[in-house]
Amino acid sequence: MKGVIFRAFLDHVGQTYGENITEQLILNCNLSSGGAYTSVGTYDTGELLSLISGLTDLTGTESTSIVKNFGKALFPILVEKYPSVVQHANNAFELISSVDNHIHIEVLKLYPDAGLPTFSPELKSPTCMWLKYDSERGLPELAEGLLQGCIDYFGEEVEIEWQDLSGGANTHVLFKLQKKEQVNGYS
Ligand code: HEM
């Protein structure tokens, strides 16, 4: 996994739990990188998993919440870092539909060795999208957090549900995104 993700993770930990926890976490995890990541470097995805379980040990927060909250925080970080990659989209569904055939293709130009998932979107109605996620890394909570971050970025309200289609490995997952009804008129 690219260093840009590790750096964002450690920044997020510092902002959420404080710098002392970040330092303690790096010490506890005995990382082969020593916790020093460059954006362009590539590191073992296992290091991210160690950091996540180390953070659960230190804070008592469940790993699934850690990953989801990180994904949510990661979206605006990525947008700030790579604004041109997202400027074509006017709403969340437009952006989400373009992750596979535009955004991650641009990511591959920047980082040819990036390990990216596959997303297959299907618009069921103007308010409902199904999105198939396939990745050998099996990180649907990260995807869910990024989707939530994207929805928040556009100030929209969309309910996210997902189900694992891979019998527990989380490598093939179906997301169902449902825009909440706008309540118009007067109450
Ligand atoms: C809603 C929007 C997005 C979703 C759902 C999404 C989803 C994901 C997921 C789940 C991963 C983890 C790898 C895996 O599961 O196999 C990933 C990796 C990544 N994504 Fe996205 N992404 C989104 C938008 C973006 C944007 C806007 C950028 C920035 C231009 C970006 C750049 C990256 C990078 C750099 C990686 C790491 C690749 C690596 O470490 O090798 N993504 N994305």
Image (cartoon, rainbow, N blue to C red):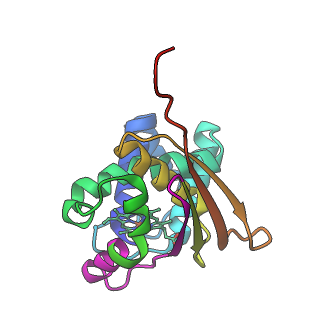
Q: Which residues are magenta?
A: 103-127
Q: Quadrant of residue 13?
A: top left
Q: Residue furthest front?
A: 185
Image coordinates for residue 178, horizontal then vertical, percent: 58, 50
Looking at the image, residue 174 lies above or below residue 55? below
Q: Hey, which quadrant is residue 18 in on the image?
A: top left
Instruction: State the image coordinates of residue 56 (x, y, percent, origin top left).
Output: 62, 45
- Which residue is at the far left? 84
Q: Nearer the viewer, residue 43 or 91?
A: 91
**Residue 122 lies within the magenta run:** yes
Work out which quarter of the rendered image holds the N terminus and state it.
bottom left
Give me the residue at 43% from left, 62% from top: 96
Quadrant holding ligand 1? bottom left
In the picture, measured across the screen, residue 8 lies left or right of residue 53, that is left
Tell me if residue 122 can be seen.
yes
Residue 65 or residue 27, whichever sits in front: 65
Depth check: 26 or 120 in front? 120
